[in-house]
Image (cartoon, rainbow, N blue to C red):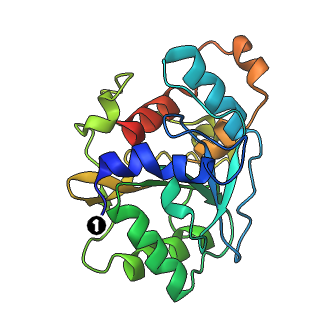
């Protein structure tokens, strides 16, 4: 079993050695998980917006482009952070489940965000079913507001910040007061959101200057947590 330090230092570097122009080992890479059952490529502007925020607020070097990685890929462990989103069915093969389990046990963080921002929709139900299959011994559990994730860079004393889509996006005024997580070795391996951060962050990064408050700040906390 590789250590987390080896995972961070050498994982992405191994991919870089394969072809010029690939990410370097010390860079944050916004890697999007591709799964065959659903609309994994929704919210296409999220990566550029989050990467812009990381450059603005931190000294973490970033790789400039989003990287798409299949759940079945042997290179999955080359990335300490994975973003997953969608509205539709989530189904993994047995090999993909094993790959995701290895990713988590090696220290990686999968951030799964339900675009429907509900608890009974197809993405929510099927993703939670898949997580029970991947981690039968470690169920998804409510993440307390006192968790270090909410203090890893910016301080969110009340837990996860609300999104505009929760308040008025669908007209149902459902506000989820917590996120769920699966922890491995006392670290978050899977962070699960019903808050639709994907849609909240899916705008041209140059328009951020028109916002009263930068709504991508929580993404910084996730990135910093994943990289430290």
Residue 99, position in %: x, y? 48, 74
Task: Determine the residue positioned at 44% across, 48% down.
Answer: 10
Q: Residue at x 71, y 71 (%)?
A: 38
Q: Is residue 151 left or right of residue 185?
A: right
Q: Is residue 98 above or below residue 105?
A: below
- On the rendered structure, is 204 left or right of 134? right
Residue 103 appears in which quarter of the rendering? bottom left
Q: On the rendered structure, is 79 left or right of 21? A: left
Residue at the image position 64 percent from the left and 45 percent from the top: 198
Q: Is residue 151 visible?
A: yes
Q: In the depicted view, which residue is nearer to us: 162 or 37?
A: 37
Residue ID at (65%, 24%): 52
Asked if one can make out residue 158 in the rendered structure from this viewpoint, the answer is no
The kind of secondary structure element at disc 1 is: loop
Q: Position of residue 153 (x, y in %)?
A: 37, 24
Quadrant (top left/top right/bottom left/bottom right) for the C terminus: top left
Dividing the image into 4 quarters, which one contains the N terminus? bottom left
Circle 1 residue: 1
């Amino acid at each position: 079993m590789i250590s987390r330090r080896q995972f961070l230092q050498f994982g992405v570097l191994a991919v870089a050695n394969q072809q010029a122009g690939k990410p370097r080992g010390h860079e944050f890479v916004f890697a999007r998980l591709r799964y065959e059952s659903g609309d994994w490529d929704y919210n296409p502007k999220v990566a550029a917006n989050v990467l812009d925020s990381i450059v603005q607020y931190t000294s973490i070097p970033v790789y400039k482009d989003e990287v798409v990685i299949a759940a079945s890929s042997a290179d999955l462990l080359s990335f300490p952070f994975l973003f997953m989103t969608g509205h539709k069915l989530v189904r993994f093969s047995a090999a993909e489940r094993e790959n995701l389990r290895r990713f988590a046990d090696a220290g990686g963080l999968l951030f799964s965000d339900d675009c429907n921002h509900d608890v009974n929709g197809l993405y929510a139900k099927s993703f939670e079913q898949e997580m029970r299959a991947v981690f039968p011994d470690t169920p998804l559990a409510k993440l307390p507001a006192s968790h270090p994730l909410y203090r890893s860079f910016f301080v969110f004393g009340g837990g996860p910040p609300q999104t505009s889509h929760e308040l008025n996006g669908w007209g149902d005024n459902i506000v989820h007061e917590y996120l769920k997580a699966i922890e491995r070795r006392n670290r978050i391996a899977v962070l699960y959101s019903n808050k639709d951060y994907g849609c909240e962050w899916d705008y041209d990064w140059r328009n951020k200057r028109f916002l009263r408050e930068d709504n991508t700040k929580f993404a910084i906390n996730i990135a910093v947590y994943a990289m430290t």
